[in-house]
Image: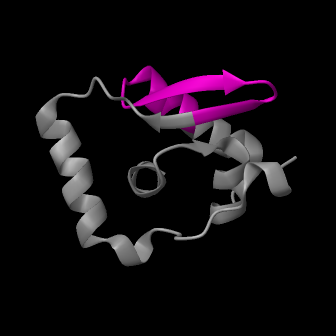
Amino acid sequence: MILMLQHHGELCVCQFVDATGMSQPKVSRHLAQLREYGLLADRKDQRWVYYRINPALQDWMATIIKTTAAYHAALIPQQVKDVDNGCV
C-alpha cells in the first residue's frame, strides 16, 4: 500500500480494495495502523478518506520508500479506479 501511495500520490480506501482484492475492513485496518505509526497522513473529503505518505517523514524514510517503489514498480498496480466513477 505504501508503494501504491508513492506511485499514485493519494488514494481512497475503495481504490486499495479494488486494486488489492482485500476486504474493506482489512484495508482500513492496515491503513489506520500505518497512520498511527506516522507513515501516512489522511484527509476526509465528504464520504471518502484519502491517504498519502506523510509529508513530515524523515528524509531517510522518504528516500527508502522512493527507492523501493522505483525498484519494484512492476509490483505496483498502475491503474486504480477513479473515485468519481464507481467507488462505493
Vertically, is 24 above or below 21? above
The part of the image, by quadrant, that contains residue 25 is top right
Residue 18 lies, in percent from the top left, at: 72, 61
Q: Is residue 42 magenta?
A: yes
Q: Write the start and end of the magenta stretch as one range.
A: 31-50
- Position of residue 55 in the picture relative to residue 26 (left or right): left
Q: Residue at x 66, y 37 (%)?
A: 28
- Position of residue 22 in the picture relative to residue 37 (left or right): right
Vertically, is 6 above or below 58? below
Query: Can residue 21 be seen at all in this image of the molecule?
Result: no
- Position of residue 31 in the picture relative to residue 16 (left or right): left
Q: Residue at x 31, y 71 (%)?
A: 72
Vertically, is 3 above or below 50? below
Q: Is residue 48 magenta?
A: yes
The number of numbered discs placed on residues in the rendered structure image is 0
The part of the image, by quadrant, that contains residue 68 is bottom left
Q: Residue at x 25, y 28 (%)?
A: 57
- Position of residue 34 in the picture relative to residue 26 (left or right): left
The part of the image, by quadrant, that contains residue 71 is bottom left
Q: Residue furthest bottom?
A: 74
Residue 74 lies, in percent from the top left, at: 39, 78
Residue 5 lies, in percent from the top left, at: 45, 49
Q: Please tell me which residue lies in front, 86 or 3.
A: 86
Residue 24 lies, in percent from the top left, at: 75, 45
Query: Can residue 25 be seen at all in this image of the molecule?
Result: yes
